[in-house]
Image (cartoon, grey):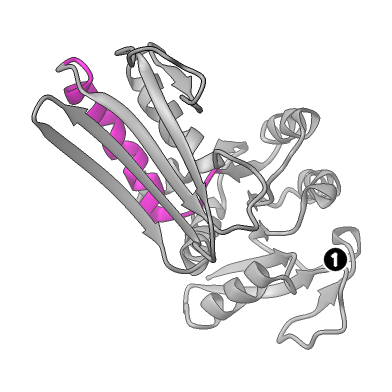
Amino acid sequence: MTNVIMHGCNGRMGQMIAGLCEKDPDITIVAGVDTYTEKKNDFPVFATISQCDVPADAVIDFSNADAVDGLLDWCVEKQIPVVLCSTGLSEEQLAKVDAASKKVAVLKSANMSLGINTLLDLLQKAVKVFAPAGFDVEIVEKHHNQKLDAPSGTALALADAMNEAMDGQYEYVYDRSERRQKRDAKELGISAVRGGTIVGEHEVIFAGADEVIELKHTAYSRAVFGKGAVEAAKFLKGRQPGLYNMQNVIAEA
């Protein structure tokens, strides 16, 4: 059994993860942390992580960037691993994540979906086949109309995975509207679509002479990210200090 503290327990993702844990016999939430403490839960809720005195095997964080510094300090002090899902971290905070990982296990990933992280692995294999054969590579990502950043962090992670596999040969191109020239073979195009309530869709296109291969992931619910976080918490239980990601979780699945 993995005992977890849910950091950001009364937010949308926190409540979703609480529901997932209720149905999973291998994990349970023993405490929550949220500035809004009036909501009734089946576990004690603290206004700040510093007030929490409940023993646990891991913390799942779906709060916000402002709360991450205090969370990391607490996890290092208590020696409790953390699944870090909050986005929008500054360069200073990312440096703090790296420093904390030398003292406690930290898992951080651009996308918590098991499907996306399996896709990352598939793309590294695929690009080694298609790129030398002259295939062009394009990424098209779609999200809801409230998403602020473009392209998505996941789209960049997909691009980075392929670029790493090809020893950094690609140049990322985000907008062709001002380019009056033919496409270069070393370009990797990334396009963003924003509309409606699209949870998340990422499509990678390998376009060659007379054939096209498409690898696509569609998230129909935010639950896919919650499921990944739950599996990550199980993975982190008892881990040595280090910076982990969802690729490590999948490798042991």
- Residue depicted at 90% across the width and 58% down the height: 50
- Residue depicted at 78% across the width and 88% down the height: 40
Give the side of residue 131 with respect to residue 34, left or right. Answer: left
| Magenta-highlighted residues | 109-132
Q: Does residue 224 sit above or below 179 in this rendering?
A: below
| Residue 48 seen from this side | yes
Residue carrying label 1: 52
Q: Amino acid at mark 1?
A: Cys
Q: Which secondary structure type mostly characterizes the magenta part of the structure?
A: helix
Q: Is residue 61 magenta?
A: no
Numbered circles on residues, count: 1
- Horizontal and vertical percent position of residue 149: 64, 43
- Horizontal and vertical percent position of residue 2: 56, 67
- Residue depicted at 71% across the width and 35% down the height: 97
Q: Secondary structure at mark 1?
A: loop
- In-front residue for pair 38/145: 145
Q: Is residue 120 magenta?
A: yes
Specify the quadrant of the image occupied by residue 18.
bottom right
| Residue 245 seen from this side | no
- Horizontal and vertical percent position of residue 159: 42, 30
Q: Residues within 10 Å of mark 1 (few under 14, many from 20)?
A: some
Q: Does residue 43 sit above or below 215 in this rendering?
A: below
Give the side of residue 33 with respect to residue 17, left or right. Answer: right
